[in-house]
Image (tube, rainbow, N blue to C red):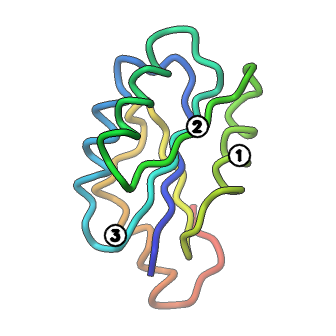
Amino acid sequence: MKISIIIPCFNEEKTLSKIVDKVLKFKSYEKEIIIVDDCSVDNTANIVNDLALKFNEIKSIRHDKNYGKGAGIKSGIKISTGDIILIQDADLEYNPEDYDSLLEPFIKTDADIVY
């Protein structure tokens, strides 16, 4: 099973590398990380580019204007190839250590969605 982890972000230069580092440590399943930069005006775009060059499992998208988090998620879904999609906020709001708990209902009960 492959997991697509979408990270929509806007002006997250202070936390983006930290959260990507935590997501990369998630080893339970094959994964791809999709970072969607929603036209940040800080150093986020450069950080995203550096991360995408450094790690093969990272894909990136940059919006040409700020469309909002929902649009970022939609853009990520369009290029995702995983069996399950997780949304990870770039500001460290969610902890990747909880991924196994989130995925459990998919595995044990064939759930369609988990919040």
Quadrant assignment for the N terminus: bottom left
Q: What secondary structure is marked by label 2?
A: strand
In the visual, does 47 lie left or right of 59?
A: left
In the visual, does 72 lie left or right of 100?
A: right
Which of pointers 1 and 2 lies earlier in the amino acid sequence? 2
Residue at label 1? 75
Which of pointers 3 and 1 lies earlier in the amino acid sequence? 1
Pointers 1 and 2 in contact (CB under 8 A)?
A: yes
Q: Residue at x 28, y 56 (%)?
A: 97
In three-dimensional space, the C-alpha distance between marks 3 and 1, rounded to whole angstroms, equals: 25 Å
Quadrant in the rendering for residue 90: top left
In the visual, does 73 lie left or right of 100?
A: right
Residue kind at label 1, given as amino acid type: Ser
Residue at label 2? 36
Question: 43 and 106: which one is in front?
Answer: 43
In three-dimensional space, the C-alpha distance between marks 1 and 2, rounded to whole angstroms, equals: 7 Å
Image location of residue 36, percent across then percent down = 58, 37
Image location of residue 18, percent across then percent down = 28, 33
The numbered dot on residue 100 is: 3
Quadrant in the rendering for residue 63: top right
